[in-house]
Image: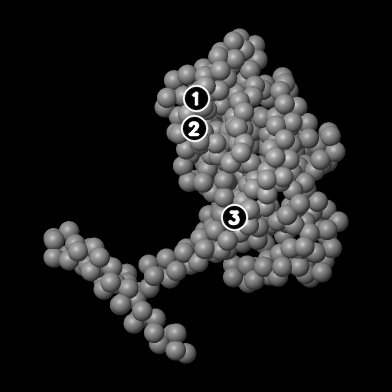
């Protein structure tokens, strides 16, 4: 398809063209990558106008069910909601965001919604780049709220934080034990905690859990300067508490745009992204070099035997690498 057709289609909000453009962005072929970059370059002025929200929580906390209800609530208010996913292990299929349209059935049928499963890893910047660029495409297509579902395990949370304005953590009632065991990281990142499943026989427990987290939050440095992380209750199944979450998000955006933290964070994210891409590129070049691949096992061996220190080994490897790439550099 011609670039102009892509640009016009996306600006019209055409879902088919949007999907094709995302496929281009997600491709691991260099040719597609280059075309994708041209497209993004042309669309850049139409990007950046959404609220980007990370939604995370431990497996089974109810992230997908929450996104279904909350996304539908927002769509019914006239918003255009895009749901993306970051799945750290692209081999996960069942119950994961990859095949989770079943949990998002209402939302996937809504004319204001667009759901895109996690891209696969691979070359050319991996999931991180693909998700960030998909956010831009969705914004150019007129989506004003981007929800990014992430399974609450380690690196994917860091990735989600690095590309969103607000971090929403979904918790389950009865998480008193979880409170001690919970990875502090997720709570420390959170701008809003939502105790989900606050319904039926869970209700009392949900209230208790809320109180526990509320007191725990006093001991945790807020994720966003000048913002006290609130703890809310919701039931995704009974569609309760959704308005409170939306009010909280709007309040957060108001607060952070007034304090300029919103813009500062976005600027930092852009620059961090640049640096992380350079790091990744250089690392791949280094470890992918034939010369390094050949000599690294021997050098590792000499470290283990106590013949070489890691620092000396590093200097040696870098020297070898620079000499190996020198002819290419001088071309
Ligand atoms: N009672 C009750 N159950 C819920 C609610 N939200 C989700 N569930 C149930 O919790 C289970 C897990 O929900 P999911 O939405 O798949 O959770 P998830 O966090 O997306 O799970 P993964 O993507 O596998 O990490 C399902 O059986 C849901 O029906 C709720 O508000 N109330
Ligand atoms: Mg899910």
Residue 95 showing in the rendered view: no
Estimate the x, y position of residue 155 in percent, counting from the top left.
48, 46
Question: In what quadrant of the picture does the N terminus appear?
Answer: bottom right
Relative to 90, does residue 270 appear above or below in the rendering? below
Mark toward the viewer: 2 or 3: 2
User: Does 144 sit left or right of 147 as displayed?
Assistant: right
Q: Quadrant of residue 206?
A: top right
In the rendered structure, the answer to whether residue 130 lies left or right of residue 137 reads: left
- Residue under the point 38% across and 73% down: 289
The image quadrant that residue 225 belongs to is top right
Mark 3 residue element: helix
- Mark 2 → mark 3, Cα distance in angstroms: 23 Å
Q: Position of residue 105 (x, y in %)?
A: 73, 33
Q: Secondary structure at mark 1?
A: helix
Determine whether the residue tagged by mark 2 lies in a helix, strand or loop: loop
For the residues labelled 3 and 1, the Cα–Cα distance comes to: 28 Å
Residue 269: assigned label:
3
- Residue at left 63%, top 67%? 33
Q: Position of residue 305 (x, y in %)?
A: 13, 60
* Residue tagged 2: 220
Judging by the rendered image, the residue that carries numbered circle 1 is: 216
Tell me which label, 3 or 1, sits earlier in the chain.
1
The reply to whether the C-beta atoms of the residues labelled 2 and 1 are less than 8 Å apart is yes
Pointer 1 residue Cβ closer than 8 Å to ligand 1 = no
């Amino acid at each position: 398809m011609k670039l102009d057709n892509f640009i016009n289609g996306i600006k019209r909000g055409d879902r088919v063209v949007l999907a094709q453009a995302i496929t281009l962005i997600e491709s691991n072929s260099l040719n597609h990558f280059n075309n994708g970059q041209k497209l993004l370059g042309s669309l850049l002025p139409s990007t950046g106008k959404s609220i980007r929200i990370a939604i995370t929580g431990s497996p089974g906390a109810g992230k997908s069910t929450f996104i279904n209800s909350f996304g539908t609530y927002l769509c019914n208010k006239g918003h255009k909601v895009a749901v993306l996913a970051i799945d750290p292990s692209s081999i996960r299929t069942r119950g994961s965001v990859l095949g989770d349209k079943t949990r998002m059935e209402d939302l996937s049928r809504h004319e204001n919604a667009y759901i895109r499963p996690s891209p696969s890893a691979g070359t050319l910047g991996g999931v991180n780049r693909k998700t960030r660029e998909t956010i831009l495409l969705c914004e150019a297509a007129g989506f004003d709220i981007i929800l990014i579902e992430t399974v609450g395990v380690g690196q994917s949370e860091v990735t989600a934080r690095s590309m969103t304005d607000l971090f929403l953590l979904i918790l389950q009632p009865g998480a008193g034990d979880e409170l001690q065991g919970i990875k502090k990281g997720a709570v420390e990142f959170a701008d809003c905690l939502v105790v989900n499943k606050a319904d039926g026989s869970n209700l009392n427990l949900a209230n208790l859990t809320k109180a526990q987290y509320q007191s725990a939050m006093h001991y945790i440095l807020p994720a966003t300067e000048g913002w006290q992380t609130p703890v809310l209750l919701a039931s995704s199944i009974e569609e309760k508490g959704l308005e409170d979450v939306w009010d909280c998000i709007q309040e957060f955006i108001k607060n952070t745009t007034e304090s300029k933290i919103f813009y500062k964070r976005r600027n930092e994210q852009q620059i961090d992204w640049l640096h992380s891409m350079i790091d990744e590129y250089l690392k791949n070049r280094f470890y992918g070099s034939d010369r390094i691949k050949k000599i690294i096992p021997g050098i590792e061996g000499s470290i283990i035997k106590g013949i070489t220190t890691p620092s000396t080994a590093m200097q040696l490897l870098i020297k070898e690498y620079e000499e190996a790439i020198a002819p290419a550099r001088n071309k």
